[in-house]
Image: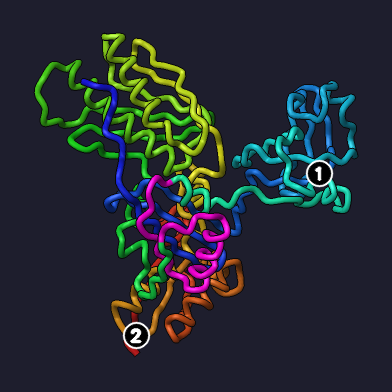
Amino acid sequence: MSARQERPSGPVRILISRLPGELRAAALREERLEDLLILRDDRPRVLGNIYLGRVQEISTGLDAAFIDIGLPRPGLLPRGEAPGKKQLGHALSEGDTVTVKVVREAGEDKGVRLTARIHDPPAGLEASASDADCPSLLTEGADPLLALIARQNEVEAIVVDDSGFCRDLAMRLEAAGMSGAEVTYDPALRPLFEREGVEEQIDALLYPLVELPGGGSLLIEPVRTLTAIDVNLGAMATSGTAQNQALEINLKAMTEIARQLRLRAVAGLIVVDCLEMKDKKARDQVVASLRLALKDDDQPCQVVGMSPSGLLEMTRRRAGPTLAELLTEPGGEEGSGRQRDAATLAYEALRLALREAEAAPGSEILVKAPDRVVQLLRKGQVAKARSLVEKRLGQGLQLECLQHNPEKDGYAALPRLEVLAVQR
């Protein structure tokens, strides 16, 4: 069996759904989700940004400096990324100002990683740094939405559900010399991602089990220091020896693993427990298949290799929060699991309100949600999005707080979300 699996080909459609404070973009090839971008104002991306920062502390133990760039946590500047060729303590002192670029996004318990060795700096950077207060943002990194569009081989259509953003995107694409695909506005009331089956595919990315076509499955489980992926045999309608079946499943798994890592934004150390294969050539074949599948990943990946027992190690650079980190928070008793956070539920409530209004014209829309969600909708970060949805509906949303029952819902869990169409 060849290691060269069939790679996705053919044109993609890009769907873009926008509400104030949240932008979601999905690249679909034959209705299958191939690329995903979710931007939220409460979790801004800073990768590629250049800042004027101030040295907060020099850690001899870490051989690095902590730089205040105006983010909640200071950034880490390793010795090898400090300016010049001197040792860190000689190149920088506490209180010094330094121009740095973000090369890795922050994690849930880590700040961003920085470099002061900026290759091909933007024009006027030095002048901007000399005139700026400290800390301050000097230039922003590449536009992540334009980057998603640019990395698609062939785009046949771009559909946007916000008229103003649709016009703005068309101008941005033209200015960037990327005006090949037509950008069209979708005015329908029912949410675009739900109509096109994207919402269901995003929901599936928050669960560990992934079924493979034709049999077999993956179990993707992030733990504190790595992401573990188990390849399971399952039921297969195939003939041949157990070793041939293991090879077939492992090869299918590699293509899907590359897709799942990209969509879930998994980063760091990844350990894949493949089905055991005694033949070294078969193991090499699977490793080659994964490398091929990762070839077009927008983040650098390194595949180390596979042990005789089937353990395959690889790494993927962190470009931002994982999908789970972006949309969920620790939940359940003693934080044993994860649940959608308040902002995710608030945006979900607004999309459900649009769906219910389309299904039951003339009805009032009642949103029953946890108190934290209702507060975000009333006067928090999602209030502007609620106002826009109410404008589209031609009526205000009725908001009601759901009571939290710890014995029923769990001590750390958010109560359920209900959106109802009520006859006037």
- Element under label 1? strand
Instruction: State left or right for residue 401 relative to residue 218.
Output: right
Q: Residue at x 79, y 31 (%)?
A: 65
Instruction: State left or right for residue 81 relative to residue 246.
Output: right
Residue 234, image quadrant? top left
Q: Which residue is mark 1?
A: 53
- Element under label 2? loop
Three-letter amino acid code of the residue under disc 1: Gly
In the image, residue 287 lies in the stretch drawn in magenta = no
Q: Residue at x 43, y 36 (%)?
A: 296
Q: Residue at x 48, y 68 (%)?
A: 166
* Residue 283, numbered circle: none
Q: Is residue 402 above or below residue 199?
A: below
Among the two numbered marks 1 and 2 on one chain, the one whose residue lies closer to the N terminus: 1
Q: Is residue 211 above or below residue 135?
A: above
Residue range highlighted in magenta? 152-181
Within 10 Å of disc 2 (Cα), the crowding (few <14, some 14-19, many 20+) is some
Three-letter amino acid code of the residue under disc 2: Ser
Question: Is residue 333 in sight in this rendering?
Answer: no
Q: Position of residue 213 (x, y in %)?
A: 21, 38
- Quarter of the image containing the N terminus? top left
Q: Which residue is mark 2?
A: 363
Q: Position of residue 405 (x, y in %)?
A: 45, 61
- Distance from disc 1 to disc 2, alpha carbons, whole Å, reads 53 Å
Q: Are marks 1 and 2 in contact (CB under 8 Å)?
A: no
Q: Is residue 41 above or below residue 262?
A: below
Of tags 1 and 2, the one toward the viewer is 1
Q: Residue at x 46, y 31 (%)?
A: 227
Which residue is farthest bottom?
424
Within 10 Å of disc 1 (Cα), the crowding (few <14, some 14-19, many 20+) is many
